[in-house]
Image (spheres, rainbow, N blue to C red):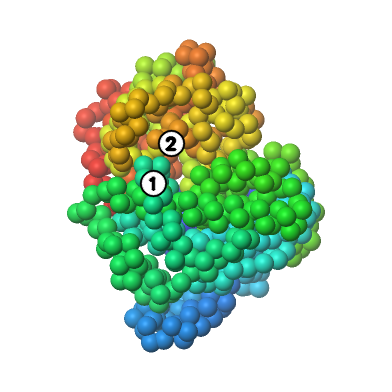
Amino acid sequence: MSSILGISAFYHDSAACILIDGKIIAAAQEERFTRIKHDPKYPYNAIEFVLKFSNLKLSEVDQIVFFEKPFLKFERLLETYVAFAPRGITSFAKAIPLWIKEKLFQKKLLFNKLKSHDVNYKSDQNINFSDHHLSHAASAFFPSPFDEAVVLTADGVGEWATTTVAIGKKNNLEIKKEIHFPHSLGLLYSAFTYYSGFKVNSGEYKLMGLAPYGNPIYEEKIKTLIDIKEDGTFRLDQKYFNYATGLTMTNKKFNDLFGQRPRDPSNEKITQFHMDIAASIQKVTEEVMIKLAKSVRKEYGIKNLCLAGGVALNCVANGKILKEKIFDNIWIQPAAGDAGGSLGAALALWHIEQGEKREVNSDDNMKGSYLGTEFSQEEIEKELKSIGANFDRVNYEDLINKTSEFLSNQKVIGWFQGRMEFGPRALGGRSIIGDPRSDKMQKNLNLKVKYRESFRPFAPSVLRDDVSKWFDINVDSPYMLMVANINSDKKIKMSEDQKKLFGIDKLNVKRSEIPAVTHVDYSARIQTVNTKDNKRYYDLISKFKEKTGCPVIVNTSFNVRGEPIVNTPTDAFNCFMGTELDYLVIGNCILDKKKQNSKFKKDYKSEFELD
């Protein structure tokens, strides 16, 4: 038996994973344990979990691998500061002491941290370092269902690379092309995230969700910032940005170009301007990704595409690549951001460095991305009793029947079942679910349960067999990383007056038979559900379909704004009592809000900082 521990840490979304004989056994983000969203710290709790789940002590692990090379990253920082001198002196003065103290000597730092897990861990000889973009590419190719694929990785920045093209064949993977810092599609998108008043590295989803409310009228202005070649390669004009040397993303020249300062989220509302900005940067991002996809398909002639890196979480762009039919098949790593780097680093070590054979699975090898913590019925009941929760235990058939009945009566439910998901999306393990046929569900969920902006869309979980009857898509999308339009026979046409509505006013128009999951441009971020990966969730949606004729339910992550997805039964109960959820269904236990002791009610509105 051969084991590899993969670690990503010290930037954002720290995580750990374990492979045994090349198979993915467990993986989790540190934020789920510490309750600090995007926690960048050393993933002590995530490592403890994956070791315990694998029945391993750290001293029994054969190899440990970190997801990037700190020396190369340091070289990039130094060269950037020199190239932009004297402009970067402020951020240089902030960054260098930390690098000299900790990050340059990462092997020693890691060894000292790792010792805290196991006194018998005595040597750092088994600590390895992968390349950041190779880790991303490996996380996408090796678990994919393809024997051969082009792998496109786009993110903010790794050591030097911001965009890479790699070719994967059997157990081999090689990076062929790179675009280097400071030219970065991820950082360009993040610059507009910052400019629109959202948090960088977490608010990018909001910008994508805001885009359909606007018109891309700033597209040409954005193209003064980015020079896009016909093959999709690009260069950014650094005169407009501050991220290479400063402590903000954009500068005065950027503000002057678009005519406004960055929005202050504490006292400035989102306006039509921000919606149009979002629509414009989204359109430019899609253009770059489509051009890159077309050029690599033409150059390498390979029919399969894998995607990774933070930009691969832009499911709207992914949907456009799919719709263009550039590749026959597309597979996207569900933990496409830095958390997935822990997994990719471990897989790269196993297959590339150690030359181990790869077994290709016709679905994929991610196990539905249900790779996190799991609680037995006994553990759930013990924990619920200890916190004073009032619950009814029911059998499986009653659980599915009652929950589907609650849904059909438009109740909002916290659904906590099986193993926790790895990656940013809840996929029916730690989800909040509702009835998509309700035209009030989207607004109510946002404002009363999630405590977030009313414009943000929700995803449909749909039975795989029914997906093409409701949406303009007929491929597996188990990880909610593809956007497609609602089928025309399910749409409700807008009146002439409704078509004239601007911005957020569009939100209140009922657009389809399932308005709660239909965005203002008739699109939806689709999760297909099959019986193999999540039978319980599949059975629930099937029962809901039996009762209502609708094979779709609303799925959003089980958390409130600014909070990581719930991990334990206690997390779930706290979120349940801090929001206007009607029921909590956890294991075979059903909790009715009306039956809970009012002293456990929490104020979750102000519990977590804005994300």
Position of residue 106 in the picture relative to residue 437 (left or right): right
Q: Is residue 538 above or below residue 89?
A: above
| Residue that appears at 30% across and 67% down | 256
**Where is 110 relative to 31, above or below?**
below
Marks counted in the figure total: 2
Q: Position of residue 35 (x, y in %)?
A: 38, 50
Residue 266 in the image: state x and y as whole percent: 22, 55
Q: Residue 424: which disc?
A: none
Q: Residues within 10 Å of mark 1 (few under 14, many from 20)?
A: some
At 40% from the left edge and 75% from the top edge, which residue is drawn?
Answer: 239
Q: Is residue 245 left or right of residue 606?
A: right
Observer-nearest of 84 and 425 = 84
Q: Amino acid at mark 2?
A: Asp
The answer to whether residue 246 is seen in the rendering is yes
Q: Residue at x 63, y 40 (%)?
A: 367
Q: What amino acid type should be assigned to the residue bearing mark 1?
A: Asn
Which residue is found at the position 53% from the left and 36% from the top?
Answer: 484
Q: Is residue 571 visible?
A: no
Residue 305 position within the rendered picture, expressed as x and y whole percent measured from the top left: 68, 50
In the figure, 449 relative to 490: above or below? below
Contact between labelled residues 1 and 2, with CB atoms less than 8 Å apart:
no
Report the residue marked by disc 2.
521
Which mark is in front, 2 or 1? Answer: 1
SS class, disc 2:
loop
Distance between the alpha carbons at the discs numbered 2 and 1: 11 Å
Q: Which residue is mark 1?
A: 215
Q: Nearer the viewer, residue 577 or 136?
A: 136
Circle 1 SS class: loop
